[in-house]
Image (spheres, helix red, strand yellow):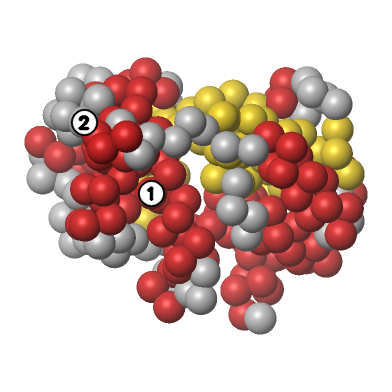
């Protein structure tokens, strides 16, 4: 797993009091709109919409906002907005690979803002393909630990559908699957009585890069700056954090 994913897990605990909640809500709403536009409004028949709605609810997105986003995405009332998905590639401090996923209604604005954030935070833009070759799409499912939610219990629940990996992150288990298996794994967990914190298709690097604490701080600042942009939905990186470096960051 990438260093950013580990850091994101730590940051998630602070989300409820994060001053960026309004921006988070805007991104969640945009995801719901796009999922509804592509797959329809039926949550049972549209797994992408189901997961987008669940993610919104987990983040305390009001139900009225969710309902309006679904209707807008489906074009009910003529409010539909067309979004483009664009990937930008770049390098952060010390050659760390960065992949930026945008969902925008203005390609020129998105490109200019991403470029500015990169150059202001020790990053540089890269040509298409120079970074993305090392990333592949994976299904990432996060399950919170409880007294009964053990690694063995989870593995038993998903035995028939299968997963690629399970990682113990202290208070959570992170399951990695093929994207096409994510819905089946999520369904198997629910059938066994396990709630999941999130289920997303993410880009994971095959070439993780260990970084020291100074580089980690700079990369995190770059990622935070990119994620603060309205058009940026996700940022993926190949930087990896050792236990010592992660402990230093969490203590700051």
| Secondary structure type for disc 1 | helix
Query: As rendered, which of 31 and 96 lies closer to the eye?
Result: 31
Question: Is residue 179 in view?
Answer: yes
Disc 2 secondary structure class: loop
> In the rendered image, which residue does mark 1 sit on?
29
Check the image and name the residue furthest to the bottom. Answer: 252
The residue depicted at 59 percent of the width and 24 percent of the height is 136
The image shows residue 161, relative to residue 43, as above or below, that is above
Could you tell me if residue 200 is visible in this image?
no
Residue 197: numbered disc: none
Quadrant of residue 128 within the rendered picture:
top right
Distance from Cα at disc 2 to Cα at disc 1: 14 Å
Residue drawn at 58 percent across, 59 percent down = 7
Note whether 60 is above or below 165 in the view shown: below
Badge 2: how crowded within 10 Å, few (<14), some, or many (20+)? Answer: many
Instruction: Please rate how many residues cluster around mark 1, counting C-alpha atoms within 10 Å: few if below 14, some from 14 to 19, many from 20.
Output: many
Near-viewer residue (135 or 127): 127
Residue farthest along the front direction in this orientation: 78
On screen, 55 above or below 48?
below
Question: Is 53 left, or right, of 194 in this rendering?
Answer: right
Q: Position of residue 172 (x, y in %)?
A: 37, 56
């Amino acid at each position: 797993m990438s260093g950013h994913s580990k850091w994101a897990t730590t940051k998630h605990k602070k989300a409820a009091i994060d001053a960026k909640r309004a921006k988070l809500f805007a991104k969640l709403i945009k995801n719901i709109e796009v999922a509804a536009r592509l797959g329809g409004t039926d949550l049972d028949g549209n797994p992408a919409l189901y997961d987008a709605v669940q993610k919104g609810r987990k983040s305390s997105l009001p139900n009225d906002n969710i309902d309006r986003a679904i209707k807008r995405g489906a074009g009910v009332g003529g409010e539909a907005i067309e979004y483009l998905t664009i990937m930008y590639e770049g390098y952060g401090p010390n050659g760390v690979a960065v992949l930026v996923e945008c969902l925008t209604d203005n390609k020129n604005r998105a490109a200019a803002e991403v470029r500015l954030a990169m150059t202001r935070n020790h990053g540089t833009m890269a040509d298409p393909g120079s970074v993305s070759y090392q990333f592949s799409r994976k299904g990432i499912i996060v399950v919170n630990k409880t007294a009964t939610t053990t690694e063995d219990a989870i593995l038993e629940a998903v035995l028939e559908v299968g997963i690629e990996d399970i990682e113990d992150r202290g208070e959570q288990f992170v399951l990695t699957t093929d994207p096409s298996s994510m819905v089946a794994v999520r369904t198997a967990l629910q059938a066994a009585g396990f709630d999941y914190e999130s289920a997303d298709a993410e880009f994971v690097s095959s070439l993780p890069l260990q970084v020291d604490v100074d580089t980690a701080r700079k990369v995190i600042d770059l990622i935070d700056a990119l994620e603060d942009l309205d058009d940026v939905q996700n940022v993926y990186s190949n930087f990896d954090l050792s236990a010592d470096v992660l402990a230093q960051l969490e203590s700051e």
